[in-house]
Image: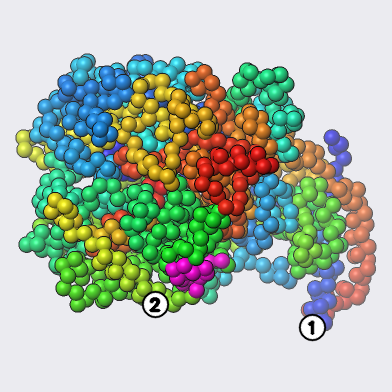
């Protein structure tokens, strides 16, 4: 991991409205039951249109990934522990094209070996259910401290709210799409019909009314917790210690570190395995890492440009 | 004044005044964004309800504006659900506002190949007649040993587990008075 | 347990040291209730999930135990044996609060003596005479023994134990050594349910079984409690009632009933399924679990009451409940002189349940059918038979939110597609009526913990949509108007009915609060009654449902109480109203020891306050509030006074929890392992394969499979079990038309293990056809290690998981799993066995087009040959 970060400017960005504490989500995947209430509550509140439904065969996940019409997404990962409780190396249970007889690579190694036996007179191997894990995790926009989507947006459609969250304004967005490749998580996405970019707003309108975001409000087990970021981080560390103390292999925080490649995430996670198992980049880096100095220069130029005319205008309003 | 407002809302100026020199924060807000409030703030009424799906009995708050439901979400006061909902409960607004919901009576005549329209009053009258006629044709006063029966096996009812107690009470009372005993519901299903 | 409801409430799970979920997939089917399980875990409690499938519940369990579908009693029986043989039972609780010490008659014979049946078995009638199951020295209980063999006796005691006649306390041996005492009979009955036998029958490794048994015992006792949660994974078997009985025995032996963090929580699947048995739309019941009168058993009210009441416990006042109901039904017309119009009630004479009704429809015995808020064309076992049956009706009324499969069976059912039914030849006249949604009417649901919660109306229903209250009321008005001039005797009940409810609003909807007030009850001065102890049998009180009596006490809608939970303790007694008498936990006197003190400080709940001379605690005591622990009944006491101050099970006529059921159960006094009706295995415990009293309907529309060892069993070698997904609701009427849910689970699929996939050549993501003698359906294939093949009786048993939500209509269509199931029922409550049956599975889609007359299996074979 590289350690060069423009942390100071990142903090400046977030602290623009320092009067309001920064808020976010702590998603504790160890108590996620994969019910998808978050996905539905989000759609109902934000009037997110439905997609053309399609059965994916990827465990119980038929939403696939975050996108313009999916602002919360629950990932399902079926695992079999390879060997021993300390062994974090977990074999993915077959999904995808097939498990027909000829396609041994998609069945578990034991079954594959059994298939190799000439007459298969022996019984096929039986899974020890104690080795099964079914990981579930509700993914969402991370509302990064250093949000590349926001930094590349040329129209000002994306902005940092007083809560420290990153929101795209549909009435400003012109659909240029610069933000889409900028996001290191593949979160922000353009809607096909109108071309504009959409993503989780952390229910900005609800926050303004002192309401909990819809997904966190609905979450039956409080796997999704909403609150002040500093408090959430403390809670997450406590929970992590609890799980590690209980010997839960692979428990780790993701996005809780201010020194990571995006300056920390306002939506961070407690995972039970490596991030890539959940489809999360292991070491996300803000794609505009080298931009801050350029932006500072731009800000200075803007101030100069305004000059006397602008100051006169302000004076004229008095 | 219009000119002044235009100049005053010029993004660069907003940036200057707010100290948001990078233009990524509050100064980037549109008027729409600045005015944004949760739509539930505008509700005329907030009605206490209970989720219609399973038997956990989650509390729901139903927000109503101009006679239309604008949002249904978990009721934080409920000691059972504490404001939470499952995906079905969270979809309650879509359930009750489904565009495919029936709003008129559909009638299929014997041997017909399609639905036709029927007024509610006419449908009620026809159903009452069907019940009266069937009951008359199939009435059993006594069994072969002379024991009282006072009943009809000519029509049956199914349903109740999704109904209100008051509804089940009136249905059972009506059926019992009519002598109908094949009254059943999903409690067995 | 003597009452037709959960003994505990969902929030109380947070107090559990161990929660065992078995026969339920709680995290998926009751996600919001599951928060209390998670909370228990976060407080250090443990969770065990025992289920044929590794589900989203298993994912959060500390221990997942895969179990062969339908082997639950073998597992629970194994627990009973483990508890007894290892002396882990809660001695003082068992001796004082259960019937362990009660001595049985000397002519009782166990399944151990008779190779799988109890004494009293009549093979010709396929039923029992329960006389020999009685306590020694007692009279025969007539209600259970003499009632028609097909009536659902188990249900008629939903709020009270089965009747047991006795003038004196039963003979007991508190040392539990008497060879005919219940404890010793129980010990002998389960002696062969060893960990080895559990392994052989259930496919659960013995080490894992013992680990579970130890955890359960370690977390039960004076200082710790364990809870059991179940759902239709237990009830939908031919031995459903007996599985729940077995669970009750486990919990009674461990002293977990009536105590915080303990109990048995029935998790019900519809908003008011509890309410619809309390105020029943069931053929054999009247409100409050009063039995429907039975033809020929009595000719008058006195006979009906004598036949159905008990001398001890609260069931002794059944006459007051029945007369108050008749007053609610027939008002001023009901007088002492005319026996309160008892004669107006229709009589049942056997099984009139829906499944019997379906076959009667097929035989053209039924002309009309009203389906209100249900979708039998998808949701009932052998739904295909239901669709065929509806084509025999003269008229059909369907009330729903959407144009569901039941309403449109005549135009796009699979049978129309196959040519078995031709639309132009179906005589059925169909009325599809738009119904109001839950936000469009006021009223109460009764949730899974017996809690009545009032909903306020938010908006008016759209168009011609109306509440079912409106439908019932106005239909009654129209019928009464049409019959107003009738002089027929049969029309008197409908004309004399008390049917004058105030209406309100632009649609003239009846006032639901007026109906609820009638249910709650009035005295002769029209004052609201505060509780069922005030009901009278002299006609001076009216009450529409005695167990709901008091829900409108003081003229206040108690079900509308909404004191926020965070301002109350976990019992939350001021939120809504629970029956009976707002008690949240049943039999809670058992949370104190015989002297009235809490068993431990950690588990205090209700206790005797000697100074105040009354029971007190966190909940309404489920006991006579001033009856001291040292009270002993005197000669001639009746009702609750006939029970002593140490007998907490006040609805049972002996005041004790029944380890052994001397009455009230049709298929035996002790739960016994029988194989499912269709099973690939042979019962290794007895010579009797399946429940001998199960209710069968052998007909061409309902063909059964051979079981293990019988010719033809190899045609259907796999076990299938049906279930729900979080994202859908039952037969789909409330979810398959809702976009946000449809996109989450858009298609019917089947879950199979990699081993079965390779054995049958099933390809993940491709299609499979599932076959039974009833029909065949198709589903997408989900190959997953979560389906664990089990080693049973020395071979591998494969189980197939089938969600049952889909049908031919809606935003997402698919075949219905219930088409595969046969109709074979539990003898007590007529519930179908859809949680364990046999089938075959093959790769590829099902045949389409005209259906041949041959069996589905032969049809698929032909299709395969053509391909």
Q: Residue furthest bottom?
A: B1
Question: Can I make out residue C111 in this image?
Answer: yes
Is residue C290 located in the magenta-colored stretch of the structure? Answer: no
Q: Nearer the viewer, mark 2 or mark 1?
A: 2
Q: Chain of mark 2?
A: B
Callouts 2 and 1 on one subunit = yes
Report the side of C628 relative to C619 (left or right).
Answer: left
Residue located 22% across and 43% down the image: C148
Q: In the rendered structure, which segment of residues is drawn in magenta?
A: B100-116
Instruction: State the colouring used for the structure image.
Output: rainbow
- Residue C431 percent location from the top left of the image: 43, 68
- Residue B32 percent location from the top left of the image: 71, 70
The prevailing secondary structure element of the residues shown in magenta is: loop
- Residue A211 percent location from the top left of the image: 59, 58
Q: Quadrant of residue B28?
A: bottom right
Report the side of C468 relative to A256 (left or right).
Answer: left
- Residue C673 percent location from the top left of the image: 37, 27
Circle 1 is placed at which residue position? B2
Residue located 84% across and 65% down the image: A155
Q: Is residue C705 above or below residue C340?
A: above
């Amino acid at each position: 991991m590289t350690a060069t970060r423009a942390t100071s400017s990142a903090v400046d960005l977030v602290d623009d409205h320092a009067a309001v504490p920064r808020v976010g989500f702590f998603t504790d995947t160890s108590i996620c039951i994969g019910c998808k209430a978050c996905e539905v509550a989000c759609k109902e509140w934000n009037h997110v249109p439905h997609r053309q439904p399609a059965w994916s065969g990827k465990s119980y996940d038929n939403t696939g990934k975050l996108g313009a019409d999916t602002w919360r997404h629950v990932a399902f990962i079926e695992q079999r522990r390879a060997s021993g409780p300390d062994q974090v190396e977990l074999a993915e249970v077959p999904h995808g094209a097939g498990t027909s007889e000829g396609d041994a690579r998609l069945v578990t190694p034991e079954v594959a070996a059994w298939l190799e036996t000439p007459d298969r007179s022996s019984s096929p191997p039986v899974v020890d259910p104690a080795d099964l894990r079914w990981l579930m995790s509700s993914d969402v926009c991370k509302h990064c401290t250093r949000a590349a989507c926001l930094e590349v947006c040329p129209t000002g459609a994306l902005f940092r709210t007083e809560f420290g969250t990153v929101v795209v304004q549909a009435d400003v967005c012109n659909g240029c799409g610069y933000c889409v490749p900028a996001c290191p998580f593949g979160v922000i996405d353009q809607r096909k019909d109108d071309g504009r970019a959409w993503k989780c707003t952390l229910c900005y309108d609800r926050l303004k009314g002192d309401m909990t975001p819809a997904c966190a409000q609905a979450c039956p087990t409080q796997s999704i917790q909403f609150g002040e970021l500093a408090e959430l981080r403390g809670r997450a560390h406590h929970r992590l210690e609890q799980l590690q103390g209980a010997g839960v292999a692979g428990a780790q925080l993701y996005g809780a570190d201010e020194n990571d490649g995006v300056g920390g995430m306002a939506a961070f996670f407690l995972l039970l395995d490596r991030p890539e198992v959940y489809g999360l980049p292991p070491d996300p880096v803000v794609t505009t890492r080298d931009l801050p100095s350029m932006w500072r220069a731009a800000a200075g130029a803007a101030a100069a440009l305004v000059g006397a005319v602008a100051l006169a205008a302000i004076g004229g309003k008095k | 004044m219009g000119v002044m407002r235009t100049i005053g809302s010029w993004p660069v100026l907003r940036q200057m005044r707010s100290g948001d020199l990078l233009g990524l924060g509050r100064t980037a807000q549109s008027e729409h964004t600045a005015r944004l409030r949760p739509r539930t703030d505008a509700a005329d009424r907030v009605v206490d309800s209970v989720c219609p799906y399973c038997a956990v009995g989650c509390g729901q708050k139903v927000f109503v504006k101009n006679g239309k439901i604008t949002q249904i979400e978990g009721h934080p006061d409920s000691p059972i659900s504490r404001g939470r909902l499952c995906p079905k409960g969270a979809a309650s607004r879509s359930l009750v506002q489904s565009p495919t919901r029936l709003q008129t009576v559909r009638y299929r005549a014997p041997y017909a190949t399609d639905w036709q329209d029927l007024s509610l009053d006419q449908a009620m009258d026809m159903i009452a007649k069907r019940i009266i006629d069937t009951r008359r044709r199939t009435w059993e006063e006594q069994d072969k040993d002379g024991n009282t029966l006072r009943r009809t096996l000519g029509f049956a009812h199914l349903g109740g587990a999704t109904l209100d107690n008051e509804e089940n009470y009136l249905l059972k009372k009506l059926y019992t008075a009519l002598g109908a005993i094949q009254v059943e519901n999903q409690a067995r299903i | 347990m003597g009452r037709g409801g959960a003994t505990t409430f969902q929030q109380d799970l947070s107090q559990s040291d161990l929660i065992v979920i078995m026969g339920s997939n709680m995290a998926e089917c009751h996600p919001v209730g599951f928060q209390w399980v998670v909370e228990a875990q976060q407080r250090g409690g443990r969770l065990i999930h025992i289920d044929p499938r590794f589900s989203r519940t298993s994912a959060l369990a500390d221990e997942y135990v895969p179990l062969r579908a339908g082997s639950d009693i073998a597992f629970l029986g194994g627990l009973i044996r483990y508890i007894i043989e290892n002396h882990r039972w809660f001695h003082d609780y068992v001796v004082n609060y259960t019937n362990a010490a009660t001595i049985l008659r000397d002519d009782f014979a166990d399944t151990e003596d008779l190779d799988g049946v109890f004494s009293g078995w009549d093979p010709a009638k396929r039923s029992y005479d329960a006389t020999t199951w009685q306590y020694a020295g007692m009279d025969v209980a007539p209600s259970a023994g003499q009632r028609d063999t097909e009536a659902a006796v188990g249900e008629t005691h939903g709020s009270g134990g089965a009747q047991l006649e006795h003038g004196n306390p039963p003979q007991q041996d508190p040392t539990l050594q008497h060879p005919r005492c219940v404890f010793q009979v129980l010990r002998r009955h389960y002696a062969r349910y060893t960990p080895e036998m559990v392994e052989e029958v259930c496919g659960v490794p013995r080490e894992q079984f013992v680990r579970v048994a130890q955890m359960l015992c370690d977390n039960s006792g004076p200082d710790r409690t364990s809870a059991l949660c179940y759902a239709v994974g237990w009830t939908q078997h031919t031995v459903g009632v007996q599985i729940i009985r077995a669970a009750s025995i486990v919990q009674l032996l461990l002293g977990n009933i009536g105590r915080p963090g303990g109990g048995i929580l029935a998790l019900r699947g519809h908003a008011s399924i509890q309410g619809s048995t309390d105020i029943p739309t069931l053929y054999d019941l009247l409100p409050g679990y009063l039995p429907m009168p039975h033809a020929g058993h009595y000719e008058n009210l006195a006979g009906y009451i004598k036949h159905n009441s008990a001398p001890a416990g609260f069931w002794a006042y059944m006459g007051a409940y029945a007369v108050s109901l008749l007053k609610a039904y027939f008002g001023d017309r009901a007088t002492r002189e005319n026996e309160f119009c008892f004669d107006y009630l229709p009589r049942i004479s056997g099984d009139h349940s829906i499944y019997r009704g379906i076959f009667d429809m097929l035989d053209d015995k039924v002309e009309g059918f009203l389906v209100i808020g249900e979708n039998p064309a998808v949701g009932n076992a052998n739904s295909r038979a239901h669709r065929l049956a509806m084509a025999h009706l003269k008229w059909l009324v369907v009330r729903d939110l959407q144009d569901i499969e039941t309403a449109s069976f005549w135009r796009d059912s699979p049978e129309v597609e196959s040519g078995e039914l031709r639309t132009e030849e179906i005589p059925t006249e169909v009325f599809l009526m738009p119904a109001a949604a839950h936000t469009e009417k006021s009223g109460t649901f009764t949730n899974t913990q017996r809690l009545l919660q009032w909903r306020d109306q938010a908006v008016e229903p759209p168009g011609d949509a109306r509440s079912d209250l409106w439908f019932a009321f106005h239909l009654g008005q129209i019928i009464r108007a049409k019959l107003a001039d009738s002089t027929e005797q049969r029309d008197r009940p409908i004309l004399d009915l008390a049917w004058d409810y105030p209406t309100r609003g632009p649609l003239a909807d009846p006032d639901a609060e007026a109906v609820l007030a009638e249910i709650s009850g009035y005295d002769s001065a029209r004052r609201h009654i505060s509780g069922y102890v005030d009901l009278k049998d002299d006609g001076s009180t009216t009450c529409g449902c005695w167990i709901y009596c008091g829900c409108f006490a003081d003229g206040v809608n108690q079900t509308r109480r909404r004191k926020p939970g965070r301002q109350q303790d976990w019992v939350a007694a001021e939120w809504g109203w629970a029956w009976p008498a707002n008690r949240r936990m049943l039999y809670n006197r058992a949370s104190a020891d015989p002297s009235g003190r809490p068993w431990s400080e950690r588990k205090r709940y209700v206790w005797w306050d000697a100074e105040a001379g009354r029971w007190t605690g966190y909940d309404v005591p489920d006991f006579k509030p001033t009856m001291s622990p040292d009270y002993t009944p005197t000669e001639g006491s009746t009702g609750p006074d006939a029970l002593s101050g140490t007998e907490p099970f006040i609805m049972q006529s002996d005041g004790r929890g029944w380890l052994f059921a001397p009455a009230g159960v049709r298929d035996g006094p002790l739960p016994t392992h029988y194989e499912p009706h269709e099973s690939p295995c042979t019962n290794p415990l007895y010579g009797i394969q399946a429940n001998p009293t199960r209710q069968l309907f052998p007909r061409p529309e309902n063909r059964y499979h051979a079981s293990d060892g019988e010719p033809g069993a190899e045609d259907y070698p796999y076990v299938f079990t049906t279930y729900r997904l979080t994202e859908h609701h039952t037969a789909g009427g409330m979810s398959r038309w809702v976009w946000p849910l449809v996109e989450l689970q858009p298609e019917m699929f089947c879950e199979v293990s990699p081993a079965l996939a390779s054995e049958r050549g099933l390809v993940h993501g491709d299609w499979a056809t599932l076959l039974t003698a009833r029909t065949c359906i198709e589903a997408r294939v989900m190959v997953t290690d979560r389906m664990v093949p089990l080693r049973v009786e020395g071979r591998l048993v494969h189980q197939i998981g089938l969600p049952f939500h889909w049908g031919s209509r809606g935003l997402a269509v698919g075949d219905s799993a219930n088409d595969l199931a046969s109709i074979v029922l539990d003898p007590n409550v007529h519930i179908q066995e859809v949680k364990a049956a046999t089938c075959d599975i093959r790769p590829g889609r099902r045949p389409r087009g005209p259906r041949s007359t041959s069996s589905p299996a032969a049809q698929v074979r032909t299709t395969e040959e053509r391909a």
